[in-house]
Amino acid sequence: MTLTVNMIHEAAGLLRAAQTERAPITPLTERYPGLDVAGAYAIQQVNLSRRLSTGRTLVGHKIGLTSAPMQTLLGVDEPDFGYILDDMVLADGCVTPAAGFCAPRVEPEVAFLLRAPLRGPGVTVADVRAATEAVAVALEIVDSRIADWKLTLPDTVADNASSGAVVLGDWTPYGDALDLAGAQASLQLNEAEIDSGVGSAVMGDPAAAVAWLANALAPFGTEIAPGQFIMSGSFTTAAFVHPGDTATATISGLGTVSLSFA
């Protein structure tokens, strides 16, 4: 059984309340056994439209579950995507309340800033390179409004691909000399390295993940607009964070960003 329009709006309301109240809920796939990925994206779009109607601005997109470590961590076998609004972007080096999230984790990524639109189908890595103005090291806070991170692919898709917030580093011009597939990433928590990885873990090349997103958005009639950025997916697994922690992401050739939790 597929979800009705009323069910989709009801599920979106449950996720909205869970985020507002910082009170995770049981998996939507348990509440709605008919929930599939298409229905999950419909739920995601309901909450995006609601946020935009309150004056928020769409500034970026995120790709999740692009690497084997993250797919293994959550037990899924394909990427997903979500949206990033203006109030989800945090300053490098800032302090943010851990209580503002349900169960936050952090991961290192490369962000792509577009100077030209990308619209699928048929977008290639070469198209991404031509459309990209600059790239930056980024630290993403992923968060799940599903209790204990016990979720399936439809659960995380509905929950805006488990988006929380992002920290962006300085933008670096994107040229042929910048080998993102070979870039090395380090994720540190309180100055101790938690994990490391290379850019090729992200679908072979982070730019390939961006191409995947542009093509995945095509059925929705959506393009990635100039001036928007894309979080291309984690180089490593994700680490839980708690009050008092400082998380740091470093990617070779791009630099370092950090964030502390109060």
Image (cartoon, helix red, strand yellow):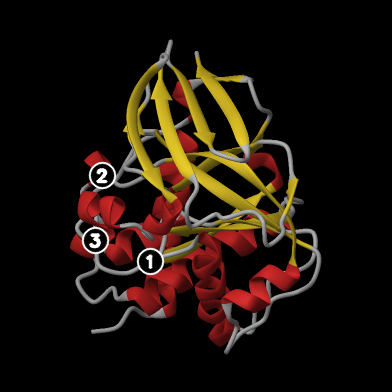
SS at circle 2: helix
Q: Which mark is residue 102?
A: none
Task: Name the front one of labels 2 and 1.
Answer: 1
Between 114 and 153, the one nearer to me in the picture: 114
Q: Is residue 198 left or right of residue 69?
A: right
Give the residue drawn at x 39%, y 53%. Answer: 14
Quadrant that contains the N terminus: bottom left
User: Residue 178 appears at what percent x and percent y?
Assistant: 63, 54
Please, is residue 215 above or below residue 189 in the view? Answer: below
Q: Which mark is residue 152?
A: 3
- The Cα–Cα distance between marks 2 and 1, rounded to whole angstroms, is 17 Å
Q: Residues within 10 Å of mark 3 (few under 14, many from 20)?
A: some
Give the labeled residue for mark 2. Answer: 149
Give the residue drawn at x 41%, y 50%. Answer: 162
Query: Which image quadrant is residue 11 in?
Result: bottom left
User: Residue 36 appears at what percent x and percent y?
Assistant: 30, 76
Give the residue drawn at x 61%, y 40%. Answer: 253
Please, is residue 94 above or below residue 19 in the view? Answer: above
- The Cα–Cα distance between marks 1 and 3, rounded to whole angstroms, is 12 Å
User: Residue 247 appears at what percent x and percent y?
Assistant: 46, 23
Q: Which mark is residue 79?
A: 1
